[in-house]
Image (tube, helix red, strand yellow):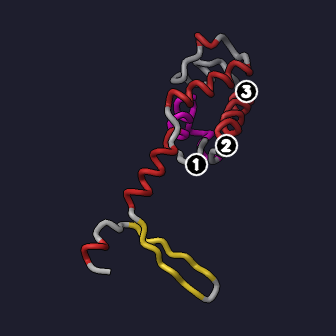
Amino acid sequence: MNEKDTKWLNATFTIYIPQMRYEVLVPHERIQDEREDSLLDRTEIHARIYNLLRQFDFKPLEEIDFDADYEKGLGLDSLEWTALITSIEHEFHTVFEDKLYEHLRTINDYVSIIEKDFTCF
């Protein structure tokens, strides 16, 4: 393989098979395109969360602000908030790290994480 051919190959993946080792060069741009295609749209995420909130019946959907703090703005206690976040995890087939629960206090905080996570669907 000459220098011209390796210019567009930016990522190297190593595959280990017992007693053998293979290195495979993969175009970096192709990986990015696949990931961006698999990301969920923010509008779709909001719609699916609204559907979850309809099932919980905390308050009328018109009064729910995704930027509001869960205690002050939404009027939820920690148990209701945990139930909602667990339902969001189930809806998007993901699991949020435990350390996030302390720092993320709005629904939009979790929407931002889902929006960047290419494993959510």
Between 63 and 2, the one lying in front of the other is 2
Q: Earlier in the sequence, mark 3 or mark 1?
A: 3
Question: What residue is drawn where x is 35% and y is 68%?
Answer: 9
- On screen, residue 14 versus residue 75, left or right, reads left
Please state, as top left, top right, bottom left or bottom right, where the C terminus lies in the image: top right
Q: Which residue is mark 1?
A: 119
Q: Are marks 3 and 2 in contact (CB under 8 Å)?
A: no
Q: Is residue 104 magenta?
A: yes
Q: Position of residue 59 (x, y in %)?
A: 67, 13
Q: Are marks 1 and 2 in contact (CB under 8 Å)?
A: yes
In space, the residues marked 1 and 2 are separated at their CA atoms by 8 Å
Residue 49 lies, with reference to residue 112, above or below; the image says: above
Query: Could you say which disc has been placed on residue 93 in the image?
Result: 2
**What's the magenta bit mostly, secondary-structure-wise?**
helix
Q: Upstream in the sequence, badge 1 or badge 2? A: 2
Query: Dot 1, how many residues are within 10 Å of its Cα: few (below 14), some (14-19), or many (20+)?
Result: some
- Quick check: 13 left or right of 76? left
Q: Which mark is residue 16?
A: none
Check the image and report above or below for 86 versus 14. Answer: above
What residue occupies the far bottom of the structure in this picture?
19
Secondary structure, mark 1, is loop
Give the residue type at disc 1.
Answer: Thr
Rate crowding at label 2 as few (under 14), some (14 to 19) or many (20 or more) other CA atoms within 10 Å: few
Q: Which residue corresponds to the image point at 67% horizontal and 43% vertical from the top-left?
A: 93
Which numbered disc, 3 or 2, marks the residue that appears first in the sequence? 3
| Rendering quarter of residue 72 | top right
How many other residues sit within 10 Å of disc 3, few (<14), some (14-19) or many (≥20)? some
* Number of the front mark, 3 or 2: 2
From this view, report whether residue 76 is shown above or below residue 27.
Answer: above
Residues rendered magenta in the picture: 98-114
- Identified by mark 2, the residue type is His
